[in-house]
Image (cartoon, rainbow, N blue to C red):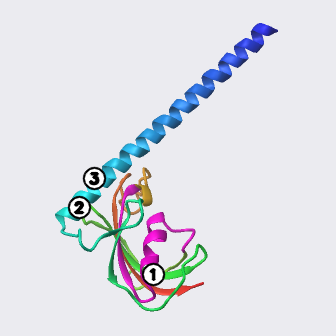
Amino acid sequence: MNRILLVICCFAAMVFAIGCKKSLVGAERYREQARIDDELMQKYITDNNLQDVAKRIDTSGVYYIVLNAGSGNAVYTNSTKVTVGYTAKLLLTGQRVDSTGTFHPSYTLGSGIIRSWQLGIPQVQKGGRVRILTPSRYAYGPYEQPKYGIPANSLMDFDITLYDVTN
């Protein structure tokens, strides 16, 4: 009985160790991709002379450029509904991958949109326009978006016009 218990404990310890190793590898991969994204973002900003206009949001690696501040004094929360028009491009190639055209969809700021939009849209008010330069971890991460032609780990460039804000 003691031998069976010992074998079970050893097996459980081995499974736990393998699980921890996989988590560590995933975390290391995430940190490495974040480092690559940040280097590419800095190079893009420098190469395009955006140092004076591109503002970094906290430590996220997301940058925004206010093209038109808009007007009003909306207070943004996770339940704020925003109506937008946008164009999405791959940052490094400039390839357009999506655009709303004349259709203006509405989203709830706290869900249903990528993290960089949650951070960048509140930088302007109704009628405003903002450009959001997005590292892959705040866009689609390691997940390819074949419908739009977006490869995994793509840095994105979103040009967003804010048509309406409601709380």
Mark number displayed over residue 134: none
Extreme residue in the bottom direction: 71
For the point 42% across and 82% down, the residue is 124
Residue nearest the observer in this picture, 57 or 121? 57
Q: Residue shown at 37%/43% (left/top)?
A: 32
Q: Which quarter of the image is occupied by the N terminus?
A: top right
- Which of these two is toward me, 163 or 105? 163
- Taking the image as shown, residue 121 lies to the left or right of residue 64, namely right
Q: Are marks 1 and 3 in contact (CB under 8 Å)?
A: no
Q: Earlier in the sequence, mark 1 or mark 2?
A: 2
Find residue 120 and report its horizontal and vertical position in percent. Answer: 42, 72
Seen in the picture, residue 149 relative to 99 is either above or below; the reply is above
Residue placed under numbered mark 2 in the picture: 44
Report the magenta residues as a range.
109-136
Q: Gap in Å between the C-alphas at discs 1 and 2?
A: 26 Å
Residue kind at label 1, given as amino acid type: Val
